[in-house]
Image (spheres, rainbow, N blue to C red):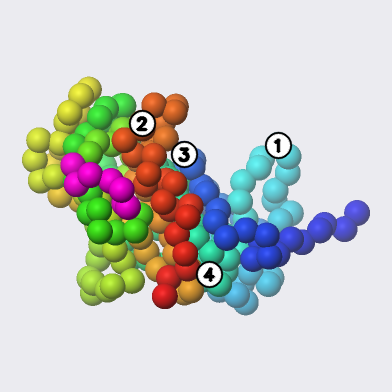
Amino acid sequence: MKKKIINTKLLFTVLIAAGLTFSAASCKKDSTGTTAETVTEADAAELTTDAITPETGGMTAQGVANLREFTAAGGTLVAMDRAAELPLNTFGLPIRNVTSGVGDTEFYVPGSILTLTVDPSQPVAYGMPPDSAAFFINSPAFAVEPPFSDALRVVATYPAANLLMSGWMLGERVIAGRAAVIDARVGKGRVILLGFRTEHRGQTHATYKLLFNSLLLPRPE
């Protein structure tokens, strides 16, 4: 039976990756043992999905290449919480997750409410107050690497001190002053990194707008 190939550019303008852990290493290998750390168009043309079965699941390097192609052609990829690791590891963005590789003895937030500083002038934050809160559960936080560019917009950050509003937190210094939400241009499209669960269990009303605005954004000029 032939596999039906669907051109997502014809059907969707926005794709959401929510609450999953992705990394280059977690993308399933193809028959040559290649992963999606650096996927070119030539690589994608040669990749197979033989390693994918109903039992193993997973995303191949071909799938990652398709996501990047979708985004570069004008689509929006919204990556929420740990799912931000996918574009960070495979899209070549000058952004790193500052919590990556940090042990639980240095940084641990098992489910707490943190103070959030928002830039309401950014389209992703339209209608948001400048001071808000984020539900953080071992989530990422972002550092933008130089050279800085208008193609990367920091939408929300954690303050430099006194982050904890409610709950428990170890290692505040790891994410203090770091970005929590970023709007990054990729080709003709964009990747929105929502570094926490903006809709956690339908309870985090204060940050719904960050998600909904991300879904409604037009293509970058």
Q: Nearer the viewer, residue 46 or 199?
A: 199
Name which residue lies at 20% across and 24% down.
Answer: 166
Residue 50 percent coordinates (x, y): 74, 54
Residue 130 percent coordinates (x, y): 19, 47
Mark 1 crowdedness (10 Å alpha carbons): few <14, some 14-19, many ≥20: few
Q: Give SS at disc 4.
A: loop
Residue 129 percent coordinates (x, y): 23, 44
Q: Is residue 154 above or below residue 128?
A: below
Q: What residue type is labelled 4?
A: Gly
Q: What residue type is labelled 1?
A: Glu
Q: Give the range drawn in magenta.
A: 125-131
- Residue lying farthest to the left in this orientation: 161
Name which residue lies at 63% across and 69% down.
Answer: 44
User: Circle 4 sits on which residue?
Assistant: 74
Q: Do the residues labelled 3 and 4 touch (CB within 8 Å)?
A: no
User: Circle 1 sits on which residue?
Assistant: 55
User: Circle 2 sits on which residue?
Assistant: 204
User: Circle 3 sits on which residue?
Assistant: 19
Of the numbered discs 4 and 1, the one sitting upstream in the chain is 1
Residue 127 located within the stretch drawn in magenta: yes
Of the numbered discs 3 and 2, the one sitting upstream in the chain is 3
Q: Are marks 4 and 2 in contact (CB under 8 Å)?
A: no
Q: Give SS at disc 3.
A: loop
Task: Indicate left or right for 217 with 96 as reference.
Answer: right
Name which residue lies at 23% across and 72% down.
Answer: 148
